[in-house]
Structure formats: C-alpha cells, structure tokens
Amino acid sequence: MSDILSCPPVGPSADIARRGPTAAQQARIAEITPFLARVGSRNQLLVRVTTEDGLVGWGESGLSGREQSVAATIRHYAGFLVGQDSRNIARIWQESYRSQYFEGGRVLTAAISAIDIALYDLLGKRMDVPVYQLLGGKQREVIPSFASTMGKDAAAQIEDVRVLVDAGWTCVRTYPGSFDASAAFDPWASLSKTAQELIAIRETFGNEICLGIDLHHRYTVAEAAAFCAMLPRGTLNFIEEPIRSETPEAYKVLRGMTEIPFAVGEEFSSKWEAARFLDAGVTQFMRLDISNIGGFTEAMKVAAMSERHYVDLMPHNPLGPVCTAASVHMSAAVPNFSWLENRHSPVEAHGFHDDSLFPQQIPMKGPDYVVPDLPGLGVVVNEEALVNQSPEHVEAPHMVRPDGSVTNW
C-alpha cells in the first residue's frame, strides 16, 4: 500500500504538477506592507503589495498627518486580502469598502486608495503595459501642471510667479501671503491683504496666466463672499476650497454670490461626496485626490461623473512620486482634464520627490509631466533607503482666531 501511495501522479493532475503554479496562483497576494517614512519636509505612507511570484506594486496614501491610523487599517485589510488574486482589483475594492457595517470614511478610503494603486502597478507590470493602458489608453502625451507661489507678500509672490512663467508655467496658484500658522488668524485682515496681493499679480502679468488661490477652507460663506467682492472682475480664474466641504448647500449659497469658478474636491473620499457637488453645480474644477478618494477604481468613476457635467479634473497632488505617477496615469486616460498640482517646481523645495529614495520617477519637460511608457506606474522605490527614513511626529497647526476660538488650519 505504501508503495502505491508513493507512486508519482499520472493523468491530468500529473500535467498540472509538471507545469507548476498557475497564473492565478502566481498572482495571489502574498504580503501587504505599509511603510511610513520621512521624505523631505513631510511623512509619506507608502504601501507595498507583493504577489506569490515575487512581483511588487507600490501605492501611496493621502491622509497626511494621520498616517498611523491608515497604516493600522492597511494591516487589518491584509488579514483578508492575502491569498486573493491581485488581478481582481474591482472586487477587492468592493470587499474592502463594503465588508464592515460602517462603510467609507477618510481613513478607510485612504487605505483602500494605497492598496488599489499598488494593485494597478502590479497588474501593469504583469501585463508589461503602463497603467493608463489598463484605463483605456492615453488621451494626451503630456500632463500640464500648475505650480504654487511661496512668497509672503505681494513683491515675493510676484517674483515667484515671474520665475514660474519664465520656466513655462501658464497656470499659477497662490496662497494668502499674510498667513502665519503660528499666530492668531484674523480672517478679515487676511482677506483684505490677500486681495491686494492678487490684484498686484494680475496687474503685473495681465491675462496671460491662469491665476488661482487656495483658501484652505478657512472661511465662512460671508467671509468668502466678501473676499470675492474685493476683487475686480477677471482677477481670479479659480478659487480653491474657500469654505469647508461638509455642506454642499453652503457652497450653493456661495456659488450664487460670486462668478469666480470653484475648485473643490481634495477632501472627498467617495464618488457619493463628489456627486453632490457636481449635481448641485458648485464646483467647476474637480480636485479629487487619487490617494484619498479610493485609488484608480473610484477616481475613474468620479472622472466620468465630472465629464457628464462638463467639469475638468484638477487633481490634488501634494505627496510623493508614487501619488504623482498615479495621478499622471489617471490624467492621461481621462478626456476631461485641466492641470495637475505640482509641488516640486523651481520655487518649492520640500524634497517630497527625493531622487535617492525614488531613483526612477515620472519625468518632466518644463511645466509638463511626460506620460511614461514603462510598465506599471513607472516608479522605482529604493526600499533599503526608505526603511531608514524614520517618520517624525506631525501635528497640523491648531489655529485660533483673535478671540481665542478654534478655527481651521
């Protein structure tokens, strides 16, 4: 009997044994690992997904300042995702989102985003195609970007804009130059000074540039409306996040008080949030963040919904090379696109795109990202160097108004 049991298998099972693991077995998820590291002036949460055949994909989470919460969620998800076929990306998204009573929320979708991006990177490498080919192919050869000024007064901002324009940028975003996170925040004083700065920039550069400002949702409807009224018509081409996004009805009220286009969406964590703003007609640029909204799977749905409303994407992209690469691939594949946020222009030096940590990144040509033809995302991560970049404790400024009350950073 023992001799019979030890005989080698014959028939179909013998053929399977000789062929080795199937494609589905090779593509099974073997490991999901979060990496929290200090890159330049901020922490980055990267995720590595490894399959049974040793292939590796990288993703990035966008919930800045709360990365530890997202990392814990990623480790939780790994408990039921390890062993699954990494190619079933849409099904994995659904299981990750729906398999709990309390669905959604920014922590969960930030974790899902990182995993989803990594799975697309994996699939592109497995099929030997860039990720945008998995999304329907590219619709443009380069991805135009907008850059931001860092100056703290009108003169410094004008100099920043001049540097950017000389380098080829045609779309520039500013911040309120008078803003100081360490001091009490007086919205009325800030808005008055900011209006003067914007008027000076427009007078200096005329209508040759697209000019926007990020107000970082620090204001009320009344304050934002008053600010818009301070600006001569045509000063601004877009105003980003003037008020908080929890209540679309408040944005609808503000929409009726100014004609300046709104750029809203970087805080969205689902297509359902985006839909309320699109259906109400209160955002003219969709600022979705692929590392927060749910990765490629959810971002492409929001892009399609935006197209229905004739709204172009202006993706939020303040993170590292992995988020940038994912944003470039998404931006290449959609028809409705304006500019991608750029945080490593000649006037910014945050170090988010450290070449020693990311030896291969999306190339740039002037102000444009060049759509790559490499498999997957086209980014190489120096894992050995990354693990030596210990994260730092990060806490956003806890801002107060002159009367001592808490306000938004």
Image (cartoon, grey):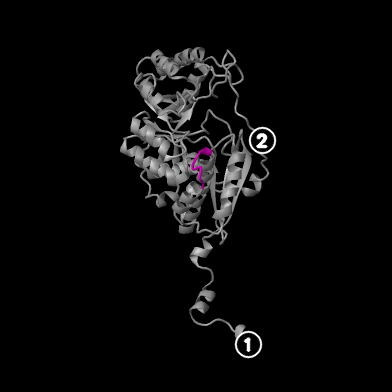
Camera-nearest residue between 93 and 326: 93
| Secondary element at tag 2 | loop
Q: Is residue 104 magenta?
A: yes
Q: Nearer the viewer, mark 1 or mark 2?
A: 1
Q: Residues within 10 Å of mark 1 (few under 14, many from 20)?
A: few
Q: Which residues are magenta?
A: 100-106
Q: Which residue is mark 2?
A: 392
On whether residue 238 falls in the magenta region, the answer is no
Viewport quadrant of the N terminus = bottom right
Q: In front: 242, or 38?
A: 242
Residue 357 visible in the displayed image: no
In the rendered structure, find residue 1 and report the number of the disc placed on it.
1
Residue 302 on image: x %, y %: 39, 40
Residue 397 in percent (x, y) is at 60, 25
Report the Cα–Cα distance between label 1 and label 2. 64 Å
Q: How many marks?
A: 2
Q: Is residue 52 rendered to the left or right of residue 200?
A: right
Label disc, if present, on residue 204 of the rendered structure: none
Q: Say which of 219 and 169 sits in front.
A: 219
Look at the magenta stretch and give its main secondary structure. Answer: loop
Is 314 drawn above or below residue 137 in the view shown?
above
Badge 2 density bin: few <14, some 14–19, many ≥20, Cα 10 Å: few
Residue 127 placed where, x, y %?
Answer: 45, 58
Specify which label sits upstream in the sequence, 1 or 2: 1
Where residue 139 sits, quadrant-wise, is: top left
Q: Position of residue 355 (x, y in %)?
A: 59, 42
393 displayed left or right of 261: right
Q: Amino acid at mark 1?
A: Met
Quadrant (top left/top right/bottom left/bottom right) for the C terminus: top right
